[in-house]
Image: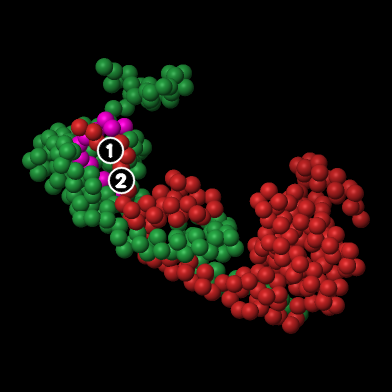
Chain colours: A red, B green
Amino acid sequence: MALNASLPMPHALDTLVQSLRRLPGVGVRSAQRMAFHLLQHDREGARVLARALEGAVAQVRHCAQCHTFTESEICATCADPRRDASKLCVVETPADQAALERTSAFQGRYFVLMGRLSPLDGIGPHDIGVHELIERAADGVVQEVILATNFTAEGEATAHVIGQALRSRGLTVTRLARGVPAGSELEYVDLGTIAHALVDRR
Amino acid sequence: MALNASLPMPHALDTLVQSLRRLPGVGVRSAQRMAFHLLQHDREGARVLARALEGAVAQVRHCAQCHTFTESEICATCADPRRDASKLCVVETPADQAALERTSAFQGRYFVLMGRLSPLDGIGPHDIGVHELIERAADGVVQEVILATNFTAEGEATAHVIGQALRSRGLTVTRLARGVPAGSELEYVDLGTIAHALVDRR
């Protein structure tokens, strides 16, 4: 008498597990735990999440000026007349933009690449809107473009490519300063950072 | 000129991030990364996940006999006439049941608690269906109840409580054997496991 070695999972549950696996960082075990939790303890949460997904897909689009997520034609930051239009800060993601905004140290405008150059993943200049950025920066109002991509290999490469393209059109391009983070002891700072801080000393 | 220190996030995006946080193990940063990924790179994935959530909530319910997830009145395992109805194996979750099924060593029936006793989380005997389990075990057909809850503190406590209740009704109750895992070297096995293996030697 042969019995199935594996347990048949209900089709709708299996579909849910497979769909949860499309989330970044979620493997099959996490997906199973999530599905189990929602169905056993939080069915209302599953309904809320389904509606939130539909709502976000229907309503969230990209700002026509800076490419960040917004529900309007132009995002709130681009629409704010108090922001200094002569300074344009280029960041990789809305999260990076939010980090800069929390400092209150920058009152200019932004261009959000919504990614970074990554040839291995097939992400080229077209995917991060380099052409639109150059057009925007050459509008005659922008006086300085501040490259605030991350200080990772891909972020640095992105800054290099964008910087070259902008400088070849005679625009002023700057990069966030590299150096020792505030509150840190030199003993525990990595060598590359100390070397950069020495070179860029002021 | 005061500018907002934080960036206003589109409402629909904020709602999505908050909803994703209802998933177990997902904090605010993971939720933001997930929302960003779906909206930027996988809007079809977001739609698929929304439909899967609705579908699972609408279709998945509990088996009337064993309490596991199913789309029918009775799950496939309970409905299978080839399974031995005289042996009833009690497990915590469908995942534990699947692990037992993969061994092909058990051909009886199951009762899935869909949880474990956890007084600190407010999970008592009622929440894991102890009353229904006792009723099922006392149906005159079941000859042996095998407690296969996990060998964690909560799983052991659950087995203890259920075991006492069943034995007091004159039922035969057994527990999965504790011992040295297959393929392991004694040198690397924890003391508690070796002690149990000594006591339960055969």
Residue at point 36%, 37% (across, down): B152
How many marks are shown on the rendered structure? 2
For residue A183, say whether it is visible.
no
Q: Nearer the viewer, residue B164 or A193?
A: A193
Q: Secondary structure at mark 2?
A: loop
Residue A116 in the image: state x and y as whole percent: 70, 57
Is residue B111 part of the magenta span, yes or no?
yes
For residue B55, say whether it is visible.
yes
Highlighted magenta segment, given as a residue range: B103-114
Vertically, is A172 above or below A188? below
Of all chains, the one bearing label 1 is A
Q: Does A146 sit left or right of A93 as displayed?
A: right
Q: Please identify the quarter of the rendering in which residue B163 is found.
A: top left
Q: Quadrant of the C terminus of chain A?
A: bottom right
Q: CA distance from mark 1 to mark 2?
A: 8 Å
Is residue A71 part of the magenta span, yes or no?
no
Furthest-bottom residue in view? A81
Residue A119 in the image: state x and y as whole percent: 71, 51
Mark 2: amino acid: Pro
Q: Are marks 1 and 2 on the same chain?
A: yes
Residue at point 56%, 72% (across, down): A60
Q: Nearer the viewer, residue B131 or A34?
A: A34
Residue named by callout 1: A4
Residue at point 26%, 45% (across, down): B112
Furthest-top residue in view? B202
Residue named by callout 2: A8
Residue A35 in the image: state x and y as whole percent: 39, 54
Q: Please identify the quarter of the rendering in which residue B159 is found.
A: top left
Mark 1: amino acid: Asn
Q: Does B86 sit left or right of B56 as displayed?
A: left
Asked whether disc 1 touches disc 2, contact meaning CB atoms under 8 Å apart, the reply is yes
Of all chains, the one bearing label 2 is A
